Amino acid sequence: MAGPLTVECPNCGGPVEWTEAARWRPFCSERCKMIDLGAWFTEERGIPGEEAPEAERDDDPA
Ligand SMILES: [Zn+2]
């Protein structure tokens, strides 16, 4: 198999040629990279109401 390997951009799903020239790989562009990192960063910081209340009780079923 000749030719560059092509992967999917994790952000937009577009084809990215896995070459030395593709400096933003696995993203297709700097923009996609920043968007993906931004989304990750936002998720990491702002988790709205994901805290589960203490539900595990040690009740005896018998
Ligand atoms: Zn992309």
Image (cartoon, helix red, strand yellow):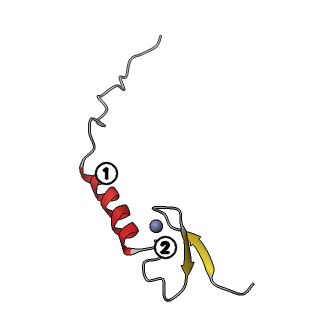
Q: Which numbered marker is on residue 55?
A: none
Tell me which residue sits at (75%, 84%) in the image: 1
Q: How crowded is mark 1: few (under 14 residues within 10 Å), some or many (20 or more)?
A: few
**Contact (CB < 8 A) between labels 2 and 1?**
no
Q: How far apart are marks 2 and 1 (CA)?
A: 20 Å
Residue at 46% over, 71% down: 27
Q: Is residue 11 left or right of residue 49?
A: right
Vertical relation: 52 (above or below) 18? above
On whether ligand 1 comes within 8 Å of the CB at mark 1, the answer is no
Side (left or right) of 4 relative to 16: right
Q: Identify which residue, 57 or 2, lies in the foreground.
A: 2
For the point 53% across and 66% down, which residue is it? 14
What x and y, as percent, mark residue 30? 37, 74
Count neighbours of disc 2 (C-alpha within 10 A) and say few if under 14, some if 14 to 19, many if 20 or more: some
**What element does badge 2 sit on?**
loop
Q: Is residue 39 above or below residue 3?
A: above
Q: Earlier in the sequence, mark 2 or mark 1?
A: 2
Instruction: Tally the numbered discs.
Output: 2
Q: In this view, does 8 lie above or below 44?
A: below
Q: Which amino acid does label 2 sit on?
A: Pro
Q: Tell me the number on the disc at residue 26.
A: 2
Residue sitting at x 26%, y 39%: 48
In the rendered view, tell whether residue 40 sits above or below residue 7: above
Q: Where does residue 28 sit, x and y in percent of width and height?
A: 47, 73
User: In the image, residue 10 lies at what x, y percent?
Assistant: 48, 63
The circle drawn on residue 43 is: 1
